[in-house]
């Protein structure tokens, strides 16, 4: 064998071993990250601080600047930014293009004002206090004006407020911030002290690329993706929908990245183009798990790149800068929002929600360092400032949630419950559930006061000539203004799984003359409100699931009397099981009181008793008819 062949064989062996080591490292790091993240996310959710803070702390703990169990935070961050692209794709799926056009004033008015004013004020403060040149101050101040899309949008979606006036303004600002990344990159490139990169396009060309790319994505969505989805729909194979959904997100992101543009913006445009597709909900359901996993990985990576050493070297400086960033942005955003007609509470809530630094700041700081505008140490320092400001967000969101439903002055004036005529019942929450309850009360001429805390729902109800009053129905002062001291009934129809005994008990104690009824999501929430003193509660899907089960038995041609026995037995078993769970405080109690595959001793016993009762009643009826014949 020749020396060349031996060398080739040796290099192949080395490459195979290196590949094996890389795979082992990747699997080990993946297991460590997921394990630590699981523990911290569960802990912080238990404390009511949200999953994001758990991911950040977990990443900082195991990252190269912490215990050093996992490395490569920058590479993981670059990959995990796909989570933001998936997030904006899903947001785009919920926005009809016409709706996006209606938001143009908020996007290019409120959004532009926030970015420009915040960027210039922060630049001036850095220039005046930290001794940077004006070029360096501008390269640092502009990125600090951005907020964290990955933190704010999931909060708006989970709270159901993304389509409210408050949520639309927050989303409009975030969308303009994403658009502003292109001019910010152009400004950094124009100020660069490094030799010009011949492969990088000039700023005016990037602007043309942005417009051309958006037009191209619109055309591809209309003439390629929609026909492809119709073709996939004929096959009915779910995995094809998963493949097409991932293809759309990744291809649009890759296309924008190849043009040095925002990958998240490309995914968002692709989502908007599919908002009218009949397969929108199928795609959304298929893409959502990938979004959750990648966003979790993103926040882990953000925690990993936090330079704990830089923080520990100058802790008060870093903490002071992070606190100053939050305070300045809250003040600027609140003032601008007030100028655009928001009430001061809603404006303050918007300022708190968007006060943190954004994930694209890491990218822009790196580019400023490569352009020789700032030293690598400064990029590391301000990256730590952005990360700490993101850590503060879950705490600030606790305050923002109490303010986000405050009505805007540019919306219709929302009357408070003190303006409502006094009635016999209060219905709290006028969504799909509360509307049916209210209709049944109206049917017996019961006077009802309707209360909801979502301005969008109130304005929608007014289109159907239904007066709904604005307010949080769990607040005692608001209930008193609505006349709760004199009503006979308070019905909670709100879609809020966090409502528990601690939330309801003050209402029960404050208004002893009113019966309190509440909607609960499931059996777990029913256990959570136990002890509050409510007069009754209904699991929202229980009755509808029984109705569908009865329909299923009818389709199997089961005898009608047998169907009635099954329903009665099921309701009895469920009641007994629920009683055992309430008594023990354990969701696993009463497990034998249910129908199971292969038969259930308790269930069969109850069915047999019902059959015997029916047979005895039939026999008694026949005997009575026979006696009557004589």
Image: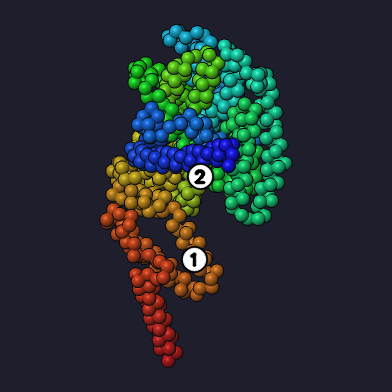
Quadrant, the N terminus: top right
Which of the pair 102/534 is nearer the observer?
102
Position above or below: 331 against 62: above
Single out the residue that lies furthest toward the bottom: 630
Q: Residues within 10 Å of mark 2 (few under 14, many from 20)?
A: few
Residue drawn where x is 41% and y is 70% of the image: 598
Residue drawn where x is 34% and y is 39% of the image: 43
Which of the pair 425/330 is nearer the observer?
330
Measuring from the top left, give residue 335's x and y in whole percent: 48, 19
Q: Secondary structure at mark 2?
A: helix
Q: Which circle marks residue 289 in the picture?
A: 2
Distance of label 1 from label 2 (alpha carbons)? 33 Å
Residue drawn where x is 52% and y is 13% of the image: 373
Which of the pair 77/204 is nearer the observer?
77
Position above or below: 411 against 519: above
Q: Residues within 10 Å of mark 1 (few under 14, many from 20)?
A: some
Horizontal side of residue 628 vs 467, given as left or right: left
Quadrant, the C terminus: bottom left
Instruction: Please name the residue that numbered disc 1 is placed on.
Output: 550
Residue drawn where x is 34% and y is 21% of the image: 312
Measuring from the top left, give residue 331's x and y in whole percent: 44, 19
Which of the pair 500/205 is nearer the observer?
205
């Amino acid at each position: 064998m020749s020396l060349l062949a031996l060398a080739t064989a040796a290099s192949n062996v080395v490459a195979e071993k290196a590949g094996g080591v890389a795979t082992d490292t990747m699997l080990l790091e993946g297991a460590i990250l997921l394990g630590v993240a699981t523990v911290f996310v569960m802990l912080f959710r238990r404390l009511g601080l949200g999953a994001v803070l758990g991911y950040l702390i977990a990443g900082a703990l195991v990252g190269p600047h912490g215990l050093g169990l996992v490395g490569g935070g920058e590479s993981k961050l670059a990959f995990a930014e796909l989570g933001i692209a998936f997030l904006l794709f899903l947001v785009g799926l919920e926005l009809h293009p016409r709706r996006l056009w209606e938001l143009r004033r908020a996007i290019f008015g409120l959004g532009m004002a926030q970015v420009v004013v915040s960027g210039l004020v922060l630049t001036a403060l850095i220039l005046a206090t930290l001794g940077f040149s004006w070029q360096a101050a501008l390269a640092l101040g502009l990125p600090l004006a951005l907020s964290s899309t990955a933190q704010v949008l999931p909060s708006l979606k989970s709270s159901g407020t993304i389509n409210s006036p408050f949520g639309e303004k927050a989303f409009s600002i975030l969308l303009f911030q994403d658009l502003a990344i292109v001019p910010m990159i152009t400004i950094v490139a124009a100020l660069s002290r490094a030799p010009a990169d011949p492969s990088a396009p000039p700023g005016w060309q990037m602007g043309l690329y942005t417009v051309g790319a958006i037009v191209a994505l619109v055309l591809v969505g209309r003439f390629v993706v929609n026909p492809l989805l119709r073709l996939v729909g004929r096959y009915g194979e779910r995995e094809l929908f998963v493949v097409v959904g991932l293809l759309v997100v990744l291809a649009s992101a890759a296309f924008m990245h190849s043009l040095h543009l925002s990958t998240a913006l490309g995914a968002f445009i692709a989502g908007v183009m599919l908002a009218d597709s009949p397969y929108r909900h199928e795609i959304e359901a298929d893409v959502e798990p990938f979004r959750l996993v990648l966003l979790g990985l993103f926040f882990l990576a953000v925690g990993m790149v936090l330079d704990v050493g830089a923080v520990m070297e100058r802790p008060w400086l870093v903490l002071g800068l992070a606190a100053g960033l939050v305070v300045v942005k809250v003040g600027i955003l609140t003032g601008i929002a007030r100028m655009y007609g928001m009430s001061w509470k809603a404006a303050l809530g918007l300022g708190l929600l968007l006060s943190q630094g954004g994930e694209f700041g890491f990218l822009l700081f790196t580019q400023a360092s490569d352009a020789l505008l700032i030293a690598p140490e400064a990029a590391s320092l301000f990256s730590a400032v952005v990360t700490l400001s993101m850590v503060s967000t879950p705490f600030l969101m606790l305050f923002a949630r109490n303010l986000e439903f405050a009505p805007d002055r540019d919306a219709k004036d929302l009357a408070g419950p003190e303006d409502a005529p006094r009635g016999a019942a209060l219905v709290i929450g006028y969504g799909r559930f509360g509307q049916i309850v209210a209709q049944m009360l109206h049917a017996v001429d019961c006077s009802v006061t309707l209360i909801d805390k979502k301005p969008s729902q109130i304005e929608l109800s007014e289109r159907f000539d239904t007066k709904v009053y604005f307010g949080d129905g769990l607040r005692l002062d608001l209930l008193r203004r609505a006349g709760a001291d004199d009503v006979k009934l308070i019905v909670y129809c709100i879609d809020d799984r966090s409502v528990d005994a601690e939330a309801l008990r003050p209402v029960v104690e404050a208004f002893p003359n009113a019966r309190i009824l509440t909607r609960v999501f499931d059996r777990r929430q029913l256990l959570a409100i136990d002890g509050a003193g409510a007069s009754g509660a209904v699991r929202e899907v229980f009755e509808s699931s029984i109705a569908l089960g009865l329909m299923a038995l009818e389709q199997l041609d089961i005898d009608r009397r047998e169907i009635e026995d099954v329903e009665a037995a099921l309701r009895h078993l469920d009641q007994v099981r629920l009683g055992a769970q309430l008594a023990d405080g354990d969701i696993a109690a009463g497990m034998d009181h249910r129908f199971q595959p292969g038969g259930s001793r308790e269930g069969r016993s109850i069915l047999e008793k019902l059959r015997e009762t029916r047979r005895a009643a039939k026999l008694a009826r026949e005997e009575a008819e026979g006696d009557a014949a004589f």
